[in-house]
Image (cartoon, rainbow, N blue to C red):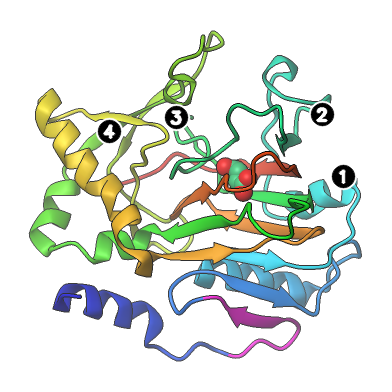
Amino acid sequence: MDQLALKAIERIAGPQRAPYHSITVDRLTPVIGAEISGVDLSRPLQTQQLTEIRRAFLENHVLVFRDQHLSVEQHKAFGRMFGELRALALEDIDGDDPELVVIRANAQSRFVAGETWHTDGTADLAPSLGSMLYVKETPAIGCGGDTLFANMHLALDMLSPAMQAFLGSLTAIHDGEIPWKGYTPPPGLPKSEHPVVVRHPETGRPTLFVNSGFTSHIVQLSAGESQALLNLLFDLVAREPVLSCRVRWAPNTLVFWDNRCTQHHAVWDYFPHSRYGERVTILGTRPMA
Ligand code: SIN
């Protein structure tokens, strides 16, 4: 690994973090992800627990809560502690609750949600703050269906200062039709222009904000230049395992991830077995350069 990358990792992994008092935080890797224990999300949270969960979220970007027994209302109530929930049109979802996206795969599935690296909903003018997926059923084979999450602050930080400065001058189009390639997209899907490098609205840290799930092209470049640059940026997450953590699900696991600074990839390695989960998405703000 080159010196730039090592320095970038050191900036994240090096500093000692303040201790937690009302929850237990076990980091999954030095750069992304943590398991949170000592909290029951079906019960009202103490103020200090919520404050520490917020801090753990900003420090680790992906939080894993195991052995949670939640009704749909309790799942949504936890989501609402971080903001308003995104409601989808009923014709666009599997189920009858506009705020709850069913994530389902079985022997009849021909694709599953999120099986490429992506960030949820970046085609929206104000993409989401984060998503909370509550998995109730994991493959009967006893393994498979893990989700990978990548730290996009670190992805940016590992690039040379010259490349970072160039990316900072660019904007990209995020197109809601991209996930529908090969199918007829429903009408009215969003398409938005966002800076390629944005600031996290809570921490102020810069992050790389393009993803192969939704980003179609870079506005200021020719088609060939745009594709070459996007390929380089998309490849970062695939090429650098140091950017990511891998969450192994068990039934009744809830994972809360930050869509402002991460990408994720749901691994479909369990066909023809089934996996079932329910996701709520918390509304965010317009990304700023
Ligand atoms: C998603 O992209 O939100 C689905 C993630 C998963 O199924 O693990």
- Name the image quarter holding the N terminus: bottom left
Residue 201 in the image: above or below residue 244: above
Q: How many labels sit on residues?
A: 4
Contact, CB < 8 Å: mark 3 with mark 1? no
Amino acid under disc 2 = Asp
**Residue interval drawn in magenta:** 19-28
What number is the disc on residue 119? none
In this image, 43 relative to 183: left or right?
Answer: right
Is-magenta flag for residue 20?
A: yes
Residue beneath disc 3? 123
Q: Residue at x 52, y 11 (%)?
A: 188
The Cα atoms of the two marked residues, 3 and 4, are separated by 10 Å
Could you tell which of marks 2 and 1 lies nearer the N-terminus?
1
Mark 1, secondary structure of its residue:
helix
The Cα atoms of the two marked residues, 2 and 3, are separated by 22 Å
In this image, 218 relative to 270: left or right?
Answer: left
Q: Tell me which image quadrant ligand 1 sits in.
A: top right
Could you tell which of marks 4 and 2 lies nearer the N-terminus?
2
The Cα atoms of the two marked residues, 3 and 1, are separated by 27 Å
Residue beneath disc 1? 72
Could you tell which of marks 2 and 3 lies nearer the N-terminus?
2
